[in-house]
Amino acid sequence: MVDQDPSVSRETAAQPYADTPIAAAAERASQVLTPGGAGQLPRPAQTRIMTVANQKGGVGKTTTAVNLAAGLALHGLRVLVVDLDPQGNASTALGIDHRAQDIASVYELLLGEVTLREAMQQSPSQEGLFCVPATLDLAGAEIELVSLVARENRLRNALSDETLTEFGIDYVFIDCPPSLGLLTVNAMVAAREVLIPIQCEYYALEGVGQLLRNIELVQAHLNPALHVSTIVLTMYDGRTKLADQVADEVRRHFGDKVLSAIIPRSVKVSEAPGYAMTIIEYDPGSRGAMSYLDAARELAMRARTAEPTADSSTS
């Protein structure tokens, strides 16, 4: 047995500082904040356009969209977030002033008044992160779109391959409003994949059935390539049996479409948008930030298997 240095207390020897939660969080944060410290994720063969949808509000849809985007950008990928929610919360979280006068937004993009290049803005938080902001004008867009030609294809036509290629965009996340209206239909027509955040709480699957039926309708009539590729479990509270039961039920229903990374319920995650930040920028050492980084890595590594197979379905 090695003799203990008499100048070192038993408590210090038994619990090295590096093993404390604060030190572990600080170590994780330093890895995230160090340029190149997060590593490089593989780029997809083609731009992955993903609609983040769930008509049930409060499930972490916007939070998931912006933090997955930030996590991928941190790993060297170039990501565009299209804020299709009139509340503009995704724009706020990415540090974009969407209340500024004469701002080019997704509203003008849908109406064909501006191009994607004119509407895109660089997020101040990360170099490879871009956003097409939403303004309150978008609230009336569904009414205005009704009378337009090819109203369901407005966003798909606006997301030009030339501009996405010019900016080297690897991922596009379209943040939908909590409804199944014309804006959400535009998002589904423009995308190839649907990412559904589901909270680990009672009534979690309520409404998902209707969403899946809408996806099938879009597949049949407007966008045959659309498919549900990813399910993200959010607001997980390990202290409750209910959270585990919901997670098991979702995994049983959707199988390997559910990411292994689970997003915990976190005060820090809720606070971050109030400071116009993603959780990865606000508190990079927190459990929420680590969970979203894990989810982003898993999403990128699954890129090869994201294409629909012969037996895949949305149900």
Image (cartoon, rainbow, N blue to C red):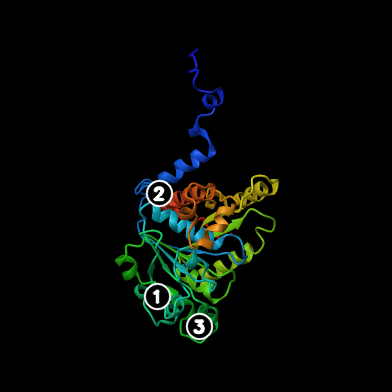
**Which residue is situated farthest in the top direction here?**
1
**Dots 3 and 2: beta carbons under 8 Å?**
no
Q: Compared with residue 248, is residue 198 higher up or lower down, i.e. above or below?
A: below
Question: SS of the residue at dot 3?
Answer: helix
Q: Nearer the viewer, mark 2 or mark 1?
A: 2
Which residue: 44% across, 58% down? 69
- Residue 111 on image: x %, y %: 44, 82
Q: Specify whether 71 is left or right of 210.
A: left
- Residue 241 on image: x %, y %: 70, 45
Residue type indicated by callout 1: Ala
Q: Compared with residue 308, is residue 9 higher up or lower down, i.e. above or below?
A: above
* Mark 1, residue position: 158
* Mark 2, residue position: 33
- Residue 120 on image: x %, y %: 38, 71
- Residue 288 on image: x %, y %: 53, 50
Q: Specify whether 115 is left or right of 135.
A: left
Residue type indicated by callout 3: Leu
Which residue: 40% across, 75% down? 158
Q: Specify whether 291 is left or right of 30.
A: right
The quarter holding residue 142 reads: bottom right
Instruction: First in sequence, mark 2 or 1: give its number.
Output: 2
Which residue: 39% across, 58% down? 126
**Which residue is situated farthest in the left direction here?**
166
Q: Nearer the viewer, residue 12 or 81?
A: 12
Question: SS of the residue at dot 1?
Answer: helix
Q: Compared with residue 162, is residue 287 higher up or lower down, i.e. above or below?
A: above
* Mark 3, residue position: 145
